[in-house]
Image (spheres, rainbow, N blue to C red):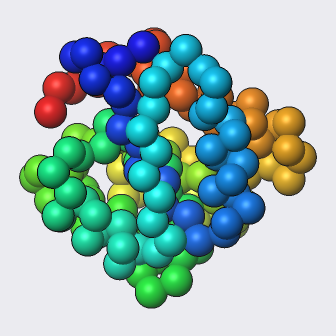
C-alpha cells in the first residue's frame, strides 16, 4: 500500500528508545510500505516538520516529551496551515483524564494509551497503520 505511488511517511515523536523499537517491529514486514522518521522531543518534532521536504502522512505523538510536550507540539501543528491537516495520533502512557480532554480539545485525531504488553503494543500500532492507510481517505498533500 502506498499513497500516490510512494511509501507512507510516518513521524514518530517518542523519547523512549524501547517504544521506538517496538514501533519499528510493529511496522516491519507488512504489506504497507512505511518510511518511519523518529524524533525524541517536541523541539525536534517541530524542526522536522518545518524543515523536512516531505511532510508525514501521519504523526504518532507521545504526550510526555522533554523540551516541548505533546500539548505544545499539537497546538503548533494545528495552528500551522501547512501542517494542520496531518492526522495526529496521541500514543502515550498517560491515562490522565485531563490529558485526554486536552488532546481532543487541541484536535488530536485520537488518543491511545500504550499497553505494557509487547503483543498488544504491536497489535495497536498495526491497527493504527491498517486503519489510517487502508480504510481512511486522507487529503493529498
Residue at 23% in and 46% down: 55
The image shows a total of numbered marks equal to 0
Answer above or below: position of 118 versus 15: above
81 relative to 121 in the view: left or right: left
Write the residue at 36% across / 73% down: 44
Residue 104 seen in render: no
> Residue lying farthest bottom?
67
Residue 53 relative to residue 92: left or right: left
Q: Position of residue 130 (x, y in %)?
A: 55, 20
Q: Nearer the viewer, residue 10 or 137?
A: 10
Q: Could you say which is closer to the camera, residue 111 or residue 126?
A: 126
Question: Quick check: can you spot residue 24?
Answer: yes
Identify the residue at image location x=54%, y=76%. 65
Position of residue 136 measured from the top left corner of the image (x, y, whole percent): 40, 18
In the image, is residue 59 above or below residue 31?
below
The N terminus, quarter of image: top left
- x%, y% of residue 82? 11, 50
Q: Residue furthest front?
A: 29
Instruction: From the top left corner, tell me how far across and down residue 61 is, in percent.
Output: 49, 57
Q: Is residue 4 above or below residue 122?
A: above
Q: Is residue 25 left or right of residue 11?
A: right
Left or right of 45 in this view: 134: right
Quadrant where the C terminus lies?
A: top left
Q: Could you tell me which residue is drawn at 22 percent across and 16 percent down?
A: 4
Residue furthest left in the image: 81
Amino acid at each position: 500500500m502506498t499513497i500516490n505511488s510512494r511509501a507512507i511517511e510516518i513521524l514518530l515523536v517518542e523519547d523512549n528508545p524501547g517504544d521506538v523499537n517496538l514501533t519499528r517491529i510493529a511496522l516491519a514486514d507488512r504489506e504497507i510500505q512505511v518510511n518511519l522518521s523518529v524524533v525524541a522531543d517536541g523541539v525536534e518534532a517541530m524542526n522536522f516538520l518545518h524543515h523536512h521536504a516531505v511532510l508525514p502522512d501521519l504523526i504518532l505523538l507521545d504526550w510526555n516529551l522533554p523540551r516541548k510536550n505533546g500539548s505544545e507540539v499539537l497546538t503548533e501543528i494545528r495552528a500551522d496551515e501547512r501542517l494542520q491537516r496531518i492526522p495526529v495520533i496521541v500514543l502515550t502512557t498517560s491515562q490522565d483524564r485531563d490529558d485526554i480532554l486536552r488532546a481532543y480539545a487541541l484536535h488530536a485525531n485520537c488518543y491511545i494509551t500504550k499497553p505494557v504488553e509487547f503483543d498488544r503494543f504491536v497489535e495497536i500500532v498495526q491497527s493504527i497503520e491498517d486503519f489510517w492507510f487502508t480504510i481512511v481517505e486522507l487529503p493529498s498533500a
